[in-house]
């Protein structure tokens, strides 16, 4: 996404974007149950980098495997590009955290624009001070291995009941998160601004 498009989208609300998409018969773009973890001070805009979780199973819940640099969740933290948004499919399971303050600090250090998950988020109080926009299903103390196993990276996922493809543009504000198909981004931004 170029700087001009990003700047235009920073000035357009999710409500306006979803209406512009509705006018084009694209209805399912607003993530349900995915809200800001803390009050929003600035709109979040970035290109989706996707991670998919499946339910954890005891025979693969080995913490050594989960800590491996080849673990897809670890790779997502290191590979999500600067300006990107890490979007996680946690199957709407809000009873376990999908990410916490240490990994969010790493993402901020790497220049990622923010995080979106339809699962829970650990360390909510500490995350407030990190200053990276985080949108999710709400706080959850249990660590991800209690419920989640990373199974896919940079593939189409579902988050908050919406299809998200790598490269889609995520726009999030106090009203929640909208998914803007990459191919329509310039046209939508132009019409929404008008």
Image (cartoon, rainbow, N blue to C red):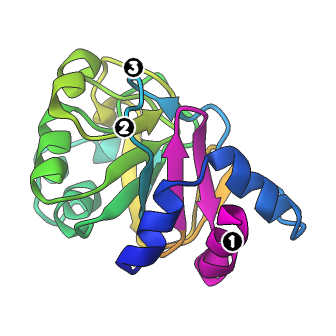
Quadrant of the image occupied by residue 57? top left
Circle 3 packing at 10 Å, graded few (<14), some (14-19), many (20+), is: many
In the rendered view, tell whether residue 81 sits above or below residue 135.
Answer: below
Quadrant of the image occupied by residue 79? bottom left
Task: From the image, tell me which residue sits under label 2.
Answer: 134
User: Marks 3 and 1: CB-CB under 8 Å?
Assistant: no
Q: CA distance from mark 3 to mark 2?
A: 11 Å
Who comes first in sequence, dot 2 or dot 1? 2
Residue 37, visible in the rendered structure: yes
* Foreground residue among 57 and 55: 55
Residue 55, visible in the rendered structure: no
Residue 20 % position (x, y):
78, 62
Circle 2: element type: strand
Q: CA distance from mark 3 to mark 1?
A: 33 Å
Circle 2 packing at 10 Å, graded few (<14), some (14-19), many (20+), is: many
What label sits on residue 139 in the rendered view? Answer: 3
Task: Name the residue rendered at 69%, 56% in the picture.
Answer: 17
Task: From the image, tell me which residue sits under label 1.
Answer: 188
Who comes first in sequence, dot 3 or dot 2? 2
């Amino acid at each position: 996404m170029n700087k001009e498009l990003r700047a235009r989208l920073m000035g357009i609300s999710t409500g306006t974007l979803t209406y512009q998409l509705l006018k084009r018969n694209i209805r399912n773009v607003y993530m349900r149950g995915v809200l800001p973890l803390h009050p929003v001070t600035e709109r979040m805009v970035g290109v989706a980098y996707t991670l998919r979780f499946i339910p954890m199973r005891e025979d693969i819940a080995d913490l050594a495997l989960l800590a491996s640099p080849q673990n897809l969740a670890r790779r997502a933290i290191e590979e999500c590009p600067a300006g990107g948004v890490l979007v996680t499919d946690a199957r709407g399971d809000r009873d376990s955290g999908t990410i916490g303050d240490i990994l969010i600090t790493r993402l901020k250090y790497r220049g990622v624009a923010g995080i979106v998950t339809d699962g829970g988020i650990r360390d909510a109080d500490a995350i407030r001070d990190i200053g990276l926009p985080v949108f999710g299903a709400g706080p959850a103390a249990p660590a991800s291995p209690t419920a989640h196993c990373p199974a896919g990276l940079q593939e189409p996922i579902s988050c908050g009941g919406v299809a998200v493809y790598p490269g889609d543009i995520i726009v999030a504000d106090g009203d929640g998160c909208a998914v803007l198909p990459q191919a329509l981004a310039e046209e939508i931004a132009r019409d929404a601004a008008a």
